[in-house]
Amino acid sequence: MTSVTIATAAYPLDEFTDFSGYAAKLTDWVDKAVDQGAQLLVFPEYGAMELGSLGGRSVASDLEASLHEVARWKPQVDALHCELTAKHGLHILGASGPVFLDGHDRPVNRATLYGPGCILGHQDKQIMTRFERETWFVAPGTGLTLFDTPLGRIGVVICYDSEFPLLSRALVEAGAEILLAPSCTDTYRGFTRVRVGAMARALENQCIVVHSPTVGDCDFCPAVDENVGSAAIYGPPDLGFPDNGIFTETVLNQPGWAIATVSLDAVAEVRRAGGVLNHLHWEEQTARIGAGVNRA
């Protein structure tokens, strides 16, 4: 049976005076997941914003300055993740954060996937929330990436992206068996939107969806000052999966790992012989919509 043990973080944002403090924190989190057998680790959207504290509170508290401060630490963040993935033979979806691309004055919100060979690639958020587009001016990315790894074929739908089914469907049609949904939400209703979206994507695509949120207060960075969430791993509530579709989840707003072992063979089997066949029957929608909508 082809299986993978996944650890997804409910991750708090901490204040640091130097990079070594951040490195110690990340190393400790990774070590704890490794001790529980994890092979794929998932960190949340905008978890990298804690690095804004390295510029001091005046920088971290400024919406624009914090973007640039976090972005300038990306090479060191990459090197640290590469060291940890090589040491433990892991795959890690690092916490996303701002990256300024050459020739662009606004950053994208980028999550990087690391493996034992270092950087495997990245996924930029595709659809921006109102805060990102109206206040923070973070730019959308330009395309989706499918990661074909020894652990399975993986796609990433960052926070709001998970609420738009055609993005996930494009990844699944390209071969994705596992979707990673890192998030950052400041209210329970926002968390619920991502949670419901993630569970719906697991249902309609008959795949694994991994949700990693930021949690707790962060008084030094107003962009991520309040964080509400629970880490979880979802599957379709059908043959070979939990009846409620939930493999594991953390207590709401409590930091820590949610860890479960999932079977990719079960994904293939439920798509072939499940009680329902949402993955197979997806295209039937096109024919029904093509017939038009009758008015009564």
Image (spheres, rainbow, N blue to C red):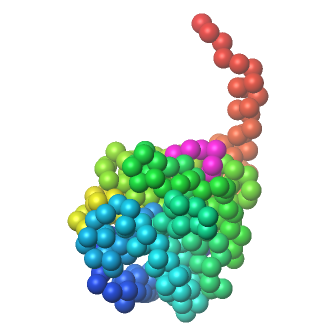
Q: Residue at x 60, y 44 (%)?
A: 165
Q: Nearest the camera: 51 or 190?
A: 51
Residue 155 x, y percent position in the rendering:
63, 61
Q: Nearest the camera: 243 or 4?
A: 4
Residue 110 x, y percent position in the rendering:
54, 65
Image height check: is 119 above or below 24?
above
Residue 269 x, y percent position in the rendering:
70, 57
* Magenta stretch encompasses residue 164: yes
Q: Is residue 11 visible?
A: no
Q: Residue furthest bottom?
A: 87
Q: Which residues are magenta?
A: 162-168
The C terminus appears in which quarter of the rendering? top right
Q: Residue at x 31, y 63 (%)?
A: 62
* Magenta stretch encompasses residue 39: no
Position of 203 compared to 36: left or right?
right
Image height check: is 20 above or below 191?
below
Magenta portion: prevailing SS class: helix
- Quarter of the image holding residue 30? bottom left
Residue 148 x, y percent position in the rendering:
71, 70
Q: Nearest the camera: 262 or 232?
A: 232
Q: Is residue 201 visible?
A: yes
